[in-house]
Image (cartoon, rainbow, N blue to C red):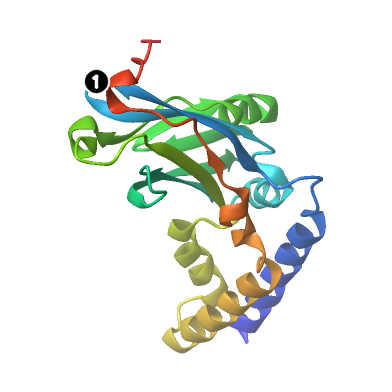
Amino acid sequence: MAARGGILAILVFICSCAAAAAPAAEPAVTAISPLRDNGHLACRILTSGLPGERLLSSMRSGIVSAVDLEVDVLDAHDRRVASALVTFQLAFDLWDEIFSVRVEGREHRLDDLAALRAWLARPPEIRLLPVADLRLMDEPLVLRGSLTLHPIAPRDRLRVQDVIAGTGAEDRNEATVSFGKLIRFFYRDQDKANDPTSAVRSRPFAVEELSHAVAP
C-alpha cells in the first residue's frame, strides 16, 4: 500500500513535468567543429534550448537529470568508424539554490538558470579519441553530434525507485515495474532528440589540418 501511495505521488510529479514539457523547440546541437587537443581529436559544440522545461522541472524537484552527447566520426564513405558518448549530469541544490553540471568527473557550479543555460549553450571543448586512432581512416572525416535527454538520470532512477518502494523487496519489484511504465508513458518521446534527422554534422576535415585548442 505504501508503494502504491508513493507511485501515485510520483505520478502527480511526472504529470506536471509532462504538462510543462512543451517547449517551442527541442534542445539540440546546433554546431560541432573538430580540433586537436594535446594529441586527441576534440570538438567544440554549440547547443540551443538546454536544459529545456522537462529537465528543468525534474531538477527543481531535486532529481538529477542528464544529457547525453553522442559524437560519431564518419569516414569519406559516410561510415561510422568511431564514436564517443559524453554525459552531462544536471542538478539543482534545493538548499543553496544553485545549479551544477558534472561531466567526466568534474563539477561546475552555476549561480542561476541563466548561467546554466549559458554553460550548456557553449560547454568546454570535449576530447573524443587519440589522433593516432584516426590515422588509418579514409579521409576526409566528419563529426556528427546529437543529444539524448534524460529527465531522470539513469544513475538516479534506482534512488527514485527506492523512495517509491520503501524497504520491502516485493514493494520494490512492484515499484520498479510501475516506475518503468510511467517513464515510458510520460517520456516516450524523449529519444527524439537523438534521431539522426536532428543530428548536426561538422565540416569535412583531415587530421593533419586540425587546428589546436587554445588554452583558456
Determine the image quadrant of residue 138.
Answer: top left
- In the rendered structure, the answer to whether residue 143 lies left or right of residue 187 reads left
158 up-or-down from 115: above or below:
below
Q: Check disc 1 and give the amino acid type.
A: Asn
Between residue 57 and residue 207, name the one nearer to us.
207
122 up-or-down from 22: above or below:
above
Give the image location of residue 15, x and y in percent.
77, 66
Between residue 207 and residue 26, name the one nearer to us.
207
- In the rendered structure, the answer to whether residue 126 lies left or right of residue 123 reads left
Of helix, strand and loop, which one carries label 1? Answer: loop
Q: Quadrant of the N terminus?
A: bottom right
Q: Which residue is mark 1?
A: 38
Residue in view at x 58 percent, y 75 percent: 179
User: What crowding class fits label 1: few (fewer than 14 Cα within 10 Å), some (14-19), or many (20 or more)?
Assistant: few
Give the image location of residue 92, x and y in percent.
59, 40
Can residue 150 be spotted in the picture?
no
Can residue 136 be spotted in the picture?
yes
Give the image location of residue 66, x and y in percent.
52, 49
- In the rendered structure, the answer to whether residue 115 lies left or right of residue 206 reads right
Q: Quadrant of the C terminus?
A: top left
Between residue 3 and residue 143, name the one nearer to us.
143
Q: How many marks?
A: 1
Residue in view at x 71 percent, y 47 percent: 26
Determine the image quadrant of residue 40.
Answer: top left
Q: Spot the residue most to the top.
A: 215
Give the image location of residue 193, x and y in percent.
62, 53
Determine the image quadrant of residue 38.
Answer: top left
161 up-or-down from 86: above or below:
below
